Image (tube, rainbow, N blue to C red):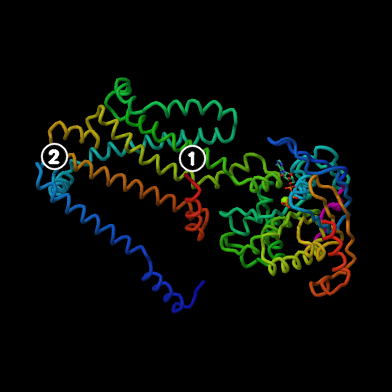
Amino acid sequence: MDSQPAGSGHIEVDRVTKTYASDAGDIQALDAIDLDIAPRELVTIVGPSGCGKSTLLRCIGGLIPPSEGRVLIDGEVVTEPDPRIGYVFQRAVLLPWRTVEKNVLLPFEIGGRPTSKDRKSVHEALEMVELSEYAKLRPAELSGGMQQRVAVARALVTEPSILLMDEPFGALDAQTRDSMNVELLRIWQEAKPTIVFVTHDIGEALFLSDRVVVMTARPGRVHEVVEVDIPRPRTFELVEGDKRFWALRHRIRAAL
Amino acid sequence: MTEQPTTEQKPRLLRRLRNEKPLGRILVVVSAALLLVVWEAWARTNSPLILPTPIAVFDRLVSYVSAGRAWPHITITVQEIVAGFALGSFMGIGLGTLAAEFNIARRVIMPYVIITQALPKFALAPILVIWFGFGTTPKIIIAALIAFFPLLENTYLGLTTTPALDLELFRALRAPRRVTLLKLRVPHAVPAVFSGLRVALLLSLVGAVVAEYVGANKGLGALIIVSQGMLDTELMFVAFVLLTLLGLTLDKLHGLSYRLVLRRLYGKTASSAGRAASRVSV
Ligand SMILES: Nc1ncnc2c1ncn2[C@@H]1O[C@H](COP(=O)(O)OP(=O)(O)OP(=O)(O)O)[C@@H](O)[C@H]1O
Ligand SMILES: [Mg+2]
């Protein structure tokens, strides 16, 4: 991962509305979302459960089409899943019959026969999440945190310019989550993709991001975009010792 | 990886002592012995025409088998089972896959499947004998018809219960349909298909034997009918024993191949994967 990601990773969300059809009538999940996320920015999204955070991420990733509005990546309208995007889901979603290494190789295998360069990328991605020694093991032999790191490696291995993360560490215990966040910042500093990170933990959001997008309950709207002017590089001691952290935390909590 | 043997062996020995398996085995042996004793006692008070004693059955089994008279029957029945099972499984897995992959195929296939299930297949045996004679063909057809359904059902189930998030991952990775089938849905369906194969294997044994009742001159089912005609209950029990041993052998072979496949897919995590899978499959 020595090369810079291809493309710049600029995301524009242009008045995106999403309405799901269901048996109980239409459910409006998103209402005219506008966002402009700069290349290499790390933006987090917080909001009450069911406000449409996952839906927004799916629209950005091209997994579902918006009902109205559009998403642009580097100026192009998104209509289908995009190779410039890496995805990390709430669960690790590893294939239990594949070794760690083969799970990370999956994106290449799907695109055709993996080359030796692809294998080298897998090796580097595993090094980045510090799991090189576990390459030959199967997911069942790893802890939850390690499995989630494999999922991060799988998302990074194709060197995407954008990383979409949907509560990736939500299922982990507090200490593991903290160390994953530290690792994520390190990876972000190294590979510098644009990251959109969904969470419902305000502390996690403030620790990670340049900006926090606060959404309202359903139908999801952008309530407020909070700039996080805490200097980098950040550590938990530094961030939690910073007065701005607590002020922002109060402000977001009040908004939710 | 080499570990210090002393720290390795101690817990293993403890585990073996605490293991419940030997206790289970002992209980099986004891209860089987008890059953045989009760059978022997009961049979002695009856005419051997009604119920031969286990000792008599055993003696007859040994003499029958050592005279080489069992083999022709066993090989015929095994041929019928294997051919019927292979044919039925092939059709079941094939049609199950089609039904899972294409909605239109499912809508065409399912009504036929339900009709063939409603029809008692043994009832077809006489007409199959008229059409195909007393050879192995009618038995293979019956065995195949019976083996077919559990495989269709389980293949369909296995291929259509892929977790939604796994499918979303493959969509995000822009996997073509064929790749999603081969790399995700098929491996996910393996345990369900194997549990279908197990049922199918034992059902094709039943199918072959019952079809032999209707019209055959060789095979373990035919042997049962012949011994009935000669009022040779002992010989009939010999056939029962041989059939039971045959069923057990087939089931063991199935278990062995399933374990091999699991080992191939899951490596060292095979046993836990198999246990997890057996909880979800039918
Ligand atoms: N496939 C779907 N069909 C119908 N309604 C859906 C679908 N997916 C989501 N919804 C609805 O849209 C709304 C937003 O869902 P979404 O999953 O985006 O919320 P979320 O903010 O990610 O929630 P959480 O924090 O609990 O993950 C919810 O009310 C949900 O019921
Ligand atoms: Mg969600």
Few, some or many residues within 10 Å of mark 1 (<14, 14–19, 20+): many
Q: Which residue is mark 2?
A: B50
Q: Earlier in the sequence, mark 2 or mark 1?
A: 2
Q: Position of residue A33 (x, y in %)?
A: 85, 46
Q: Is residue B87 above or below residue B267?
A: above
- Residue sitting nearer the eye, A171 or B16: A171
Q: Which residue is mark 1?
A: B154
Q: Are marks 2 and 1 in contact (CB under 8 Å)?
A: no
Q: Is residue A123 above or below residue A67?
A: below
Does ligand 1 reach within 8 Å of label 2's beta carbon?
no
- Residue sitting nearer the eye, A130 or A59: A59
Q: Is residue A10 magenta?
A: yes
Where does the magenta region start and end?
A1-12
Residue B228 picture quarter = top left
Few, some or many residues within 10 Å of mark 2 (<14, 14–19, 20+): few
How far is mark 2 from mark 1, CA to CA?
Answer: 41 Å
